[in-house]
Image (tube, rainbow, N blue to C red):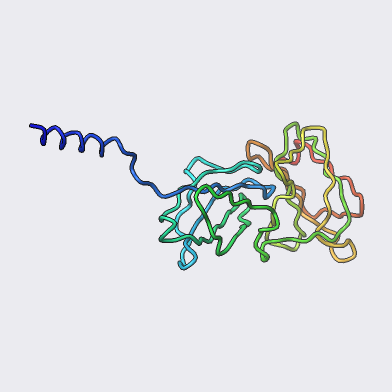
């Protein structure tokens, strides 16, 4: 009788113990942009695997997310980690040694070199008279097939009636005609094509510029 009671007690004790889990780490987004995808791969692997954010989850600038490691630390403790923002720009840290509850902070300096852009031209002023708040601004030379990256960083917006000064990608002597696109919170876009610019030009967008 005592033996049966002890066996029952042991089974109950095991059931009460928490299941052993792999440790978690925290990914901090200080890139200045909203991150849509997070990938984490053991350094020895050649594949990034699947996005670790939930299908409806994003990582706004200044926020963080806790992710569970795929392996115990005594099996794998070095990982490559990549973030991808809404423009497709990527930010990567390679061969990161992690510990339980490590905080891995990503900044704009982690942007992959091939994605980084330089802006060597003079400033122009973009004026928003569309009636809506603008969340994204794109400036591309007219001869280019790509819009490039959003020029409003760190969750900046342009309220209706406000303006922003942005540096052109190239000196006016090299490139003087640009396509400029604004996008509001509803995804509506406002575009001016083949704009002749000069230093300190004011480019005013209204609702008539809606695509």
Return the x and y of residue 139 as percentages of the image width and height: 76, 53
Q: In which quarter of the image is the C terminus?
A: top right
The tally of labels here is: 0
In percent of the image, x 46 and y 64: which residue is there? 47
In percent of the image, x 90 and y 49: which residue is there? 201
Q: Nearer the viewer, residue 161 or 5?
A: 5
Left or right of residue 151: residue 199: right
In percent of the image, x 20 and y 34: which residue is there? 9
Return the x and y of residue 180 as percentages of the image width and height: 76, 50
Q: Which of 37 and 170 is in front in this view?
A: 37
Left or right of residue 55: residue 19: left
Return the x and y of residue 132 as percentages of the image width and height: 72, 33
Left or right of residue 51: residue 36: right
Residue furthest out toward the right: 199
Residue furthest out toward the left: 1
In which quadrant of the rendered view does residue 130 lie?
A: top right
């Amino acid at each position: 009788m005592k033996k049966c009671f002890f066996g029952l007690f042991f089974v109950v004790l095991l059931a009460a113990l928490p299941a052993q889990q792999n440790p978690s780490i925290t990914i901090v987004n200080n890139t200045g942009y909203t991150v849509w995808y997070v990938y984490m791969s053991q350094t020895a692997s050649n594949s990034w695997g699947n996005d670790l954010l939930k299908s409806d989850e994003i990582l706004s600038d200044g926020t963080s997310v806790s992710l569970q490691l795929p392996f115990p630390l005594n099996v794998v403790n070095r990982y490559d980690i990549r973030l991808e923002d809404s423009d497709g720009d990527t930010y990567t840290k390679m061969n990161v040694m992690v510990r339980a509850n490590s905080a891995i902070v990503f900044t704009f300096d982690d942007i992959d070199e091939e994605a980084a852009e330089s802006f060597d031209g003079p400033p122009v002023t973009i004026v928003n008279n569309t009636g809506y708040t603008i969340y994204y601004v794109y400036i591309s030379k007219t001869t280019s097939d790509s819009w490039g990256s959003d020029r409003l960083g760190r969750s900046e917006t342009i309220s209706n009636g406000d303006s922003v000064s942005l540096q052109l990608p190239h000196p006016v002597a090299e490139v003087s005609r640009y396509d400029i696109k604004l996008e509001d919170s509803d995804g509506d876009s406002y575009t001016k094509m083949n704009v002749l610019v000069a230093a300190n030009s004011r480019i005013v967008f209204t609702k008539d510029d809606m695509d």
